[in-house]
Amino acid sequence: MEAPPQPWPTGLAEQCEPLVRRVLAPNPSHYTFTGTQTYVIGAGDEVAVIDPGPVDTGAPDHADTNGAGHVEAILAAVGKARIAAILCTHTHRDHSPASRALKAVTRAPIVGCAPLSMDDDGPRADAAFDPDYAPDRILADGERISGPDWTIEAVATPGHTSNHLCYSLVESGALFTGDHVMAWSTSVVSPPDGDMSAYMASLQKLYDREDRVYYPAHGPAVEKPRQLVRGMLGHRRSREAQILRLLDTGPHTIGQMVPVMYKGLDPRLNGAAGRSVLAHLIDLKQRGVVGEEEETWSLRG
């Protein structure tokens, strides 16, 4: 999906539905689309904030359209309301670092996903992890927090990262999907923390739900969520089938697979493609379908 034409509504509060406002951070990239979308939940005097975003958006080269940083834009959207909780879907640095700056100003607790510190010597295809994320409270799958006019329920969705949570707004049937499901792109699943088997199980978990709309951290709202998730499951199964067809012709390295599987891909995204292929191969290896020797993969049996 191509990014919409600029100017984008960076730093402005957009009303998505009665209990949901969205504030776009000025951090567009090939991996964040137009930027990270922070959501303010609640219409009364007590609200929650989901995915406060990156830490450095107040720098001059990240200034929003009003000349203020993203944390200031969130505070402007909140107005006189009290922030009851700052929630993070996961700890990539385009999602969680601003939680600390927002907490410093508001004293609101950081709630949601567990902390994660992952050493990875492979090429990073997505934002690096936030090593300083420190939640005041970790939410388990199905656990809820609430305000005067809103109830948020945690939905564990590991795969993109092992600590990824989605959040359901019980009153409206909306689901805030972070990076797990997005309409503009498939999610990067990058080992060792990214896990294709867990990702597929999490997609199936969402498909079995009846959420009305998805609000991802990047890109437009998803008005037909089950249809999109069904397509994403099919896409990943198709990628697996591609790998098996290639290996059926003989052993391959990931570097040999990527240009065949991703024809016409922007070279800047080769790293992401390779990491997703690796995630599929690890899953297939765990299932006893393929084997690896000196970074060359082949069918078993």
Image (spheres, grey):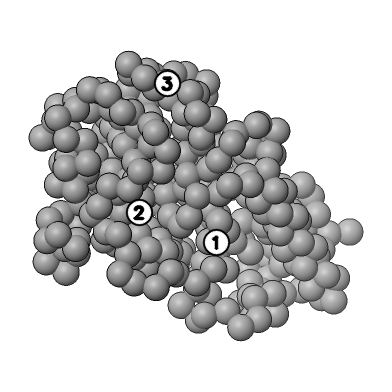
Is the residue marked by circle 2 packed among few (<14), some (14-19), or many (20+) residues within 10 Å?
many
Between the residue at mark 3 and the residue at mark 1, the CA separation in whole angstroms equals 29 Å
Q: Position of residue 92 (x, y in %)?
A: 37, 49
Q: Mark on residue 151?
A: 3
Left or right relative to 299: residue 29: left
Query: In front of the other: label 2 or label 3?
Result: 3
Q: Toward the viewer: 232 or 301?
A: 232
Which of the 4 image quarters holds residue 210? top right
Q: Helix, strand or loop at disc 3?
A: strand
Q: What residue type is labelled 1?
A: Ser
What residue sits right under mark 1 in the picture? 185
Q: Toward the viewer: 120 or 198?
A: 198
Q: Toward the viewer: 254 or 4?
A: 4
Is the residue marked by circle 3 packed among few (<14), some (14-19), or many (20+) residues within 10 Å?
some
* Cβ atoms at labels 2 and 3 below 8 Å apart: no
Q: Helix, strand or loop at disc 2?
A: loop
Q: Mark on residue 130?
A: none
Please say whether residue 115 is visible from this viewpoint.
no
What residue sits right under mark 2 in the picture? 36
| Lower sequence index among marks 2 and 3 | 2
Q: What residue type is labelled 2?
A: Thr
Q: Toward the viewer: 162 or 53?
A: 53
Query: In front of the other: label 3 or label 1?
Result: 3
